[in-house]
Amino acid sequence: MPEPTPSALSNNPIPLPKDQLLEAYRTMRTIRDFEERLHVEFAKGDIPGFVHLYAGEEACATGVMMHLTDIDRIASTHRGHGHCIAKGVDVGEMMAEIYGKETGSCRGKGGSMHIADLSKGMMGANGILGAGAPLICGAGLAAKFRGDGGVGITFFGDGAANQGTVLESMNLAAIWNLPVIFVIENNGYAEATSVTYATAVDSYVDRATGFGLPAVSVDGTDFFAVHKAAGDLIAKARGGGGPAVLECKMSRFFGHFEGDSQTYKAKGENEFNRANRDCLKIFADRVTAAGVVSEAEIALLDREVASLIDDAVTSAKAAPLPAARDLLSDVYVSY
Amino acid sequence: MARKLSFKMAINEALDLEMRRDPSVILLGEDIVGGSGAPGEKDAWGGVLGVTKGLYAKHGNRLLDTPLSESAYIGAAVGAAACGMRPVAELMFLDFMGVCFDQILNQAAKFRYMFGGKATTPVVIRAMVGAGFRAAAQHSQMLTPMFTHVPGLKVVCPSNAYDAKGLLIQSIRDDDPVIFCEHKNLYGHEVDVPTEAYAIPFGEANVVRDGKDVTIVSYGLTVHRAMDAAAALSRQHGIEAEVIDLRTLSPIDWDTVIESVENTGRLVVVDEAHPRCSIATDVAAYVAQQAFGALKAAPQMVTAPHTPVPFSPTLEDLYIPTAEAIAGAVLRTVPHALAA
Ligand SMILES: Cc1ncc(C[n+]2csc(CCOP(=O)(O)OP(=O)(O)O)c2C)c(N)n1
Ligand SMILES: [Mg+2]
């Protein structure tokens, strides 16, 4: 996608061409509907295991991933559905994976916490906090050796930011000048614990600076802020300018996992966030008010996404279960 | 006085009683209180599945919520233990040992020996183990053999609420580092549990069923599967299995196992861990060496397969040793019963 030239933007308060705006909205809407639907299906008891929903944080994954192609790698988290969708993982295969079906992204062996699609540069959701940071240093190292211009992005939460692996990786990326971006998804909570309790510094930017890394903190509910900051950092890393940290501040609309009573939140906190910190609403209001995208175009995307998610759920439910022999397959390449 | 109590609440009660008895007992872990620094309820979680819920109201700041930094807080628990405290650290899922293993393997386990017997490290690390929760490959492992392999660590894995309470109290009072493994699928299981404090000594297996024909040795959740198998074998084949619950894996009660095999002549070991270098191989090898003359058939092992834990419920149900698989293994040691 060619970057719009500054002159083309000067008459336009929205700093992206229309096709990219529609793409951004479609991605964010797909993530939102995917998660809202999982919330409903989980409550029916149809979905096994732990499910961590990304609703409320869509602008972060989308704003970052729009700068990437399949040669770029990402390492995700336990809250990984949004990263998967924004990186282009097939929504039907994701849904089937979450239902534990043979047709899933990982043939039912991984589940929600381990969805991966290496062909799309998606190195896996992860059940171990902080595990993605060293892995993405490896992705950056591989890109450097191969000279393919790829970058690596690792996402992790405000809580996982306190893992030793993350801090070690920041230093490693810095001394080797790796094409790696550390994206901190600061939603204010790690499970039931507030970031203000668990993290000593007020700003992750200060911490990154201590590692010699350039860092930017943005409002993660503002797609345009994320998109701009991520674009600058990724372009620099791609060009050999080295690693950086991007902090996105936003809110998760659901509990830590499905089934969380969320009593650690303030009364009305979720309602407030949905009313005031909804990245989709903020985006749609802005592009429609500017007259760049019409309400009808938004409504059309909404309908298309709704049927995409419906189809994904219907097919996932109807899909076959893994065969018994799959229990023993793929432990090794050869043994 | 005894009353029905769940496995989960038995652990809660053991922690409460020991905290009352001994001011050096402190608890550390991620969200063992919950709500720290948050605008809503404090003690919002009491652990990810509510095991420590309510202890904050009783013991306040002796419960410390930690950042998501296992190396730091597990290591801090080890260090505090070496300095006179009795910390009980919760590692949530034992799978997370990968993050903090040095503090356990090279620090806690080694101090006593390496420092010429001059150190004690009375730390307890509690963690959930086991499959069946649909929690997939990184939250479901039975990693007990990884710890029994390490000299200096004690390893406990109870099968019921009564044992959980008594063994946890012993773990806290014990002067060595203890890895206390809680099977997440047993948390809701209830048995009669006395209200007062009691300690179950380490290295004393529990013979949970008497039998003359075959010895089934297990621990944790699979003790229940072994009991189901024993009931079916008795009903269908007239085979009476003796079922031994090891309770502690390090130390391990060899005497009870050997004595039983000397009576029955047959051994089946059931282990939810992977088959290689497991509790199952350990027990089978020891019995083969020490009671070879008593054996009428080759020892059998029933374990999880040599694979990670799969997510899909259909696969995960095949992963965990079943009562049918245990009964099948027993029948392999009793060829005439198969013919009958
Ligand atoms: C090494 C490790 N420790 C603990 C956990 C349990 N756990 C899963 S998610 C989570 C909270 C993560 O908080 P944060 O990093 O802020 O991400 P968020 O859930 O807010 O997206 C915890 C403690 C884990 N999965 N891995
Ligand atoms: Mg968080």
Image (cartoon, coloured by chain):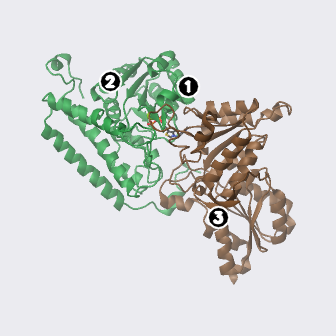
The residue at which mark 2 appears reads as A231
Crowding at dot 2, Cα within 10 Å, few <14 / some 14-19 / many 20+, comes out as some
Residue B149 visible in the displayed image: no
Q: Which chain is brown?
A: B
Q: Which residue is disc 1 drawn over?
A: A168
Spot occupied by residue A219 in the image (x, y as percentages of width and height): 34, 26
Q: What's under tag 1, amino acid-wise? A: Glu
Where is residue A104? Give x, y as percent: 40, 52
Determine the secondary structure under disc 3. Answer: helix
The three-letter amino acid code for the residue at tag 3 is His
Badge 2 sits on which subunit?
A
Cβ(mark 1) to ligand 1 < 8 Å? no
Work out whether B37 lies above or below B54. above
First in sequence: mark 1 vs mark 2: 1
Q: Position of residue B229 (x, y in %)?
A: 65, 71
Residue at label 3?
Answer: B224
Looking at the rendered structure, the number of numbered marks drawn on it comes to 3
The chain in green: A
The chain identifier of the residue carrying mark 3 reads B
Q: Quadrant of ligand 2?
A: top left
The one nearer the camera, A30 or A219, is A219
Tell me whether circle 1 and circle 3 mark residues in contact (CB < 8 Å): no
Work out how far the residue at label 1 is from the one at label 2, CA to CA, in angstroms: 25 Å
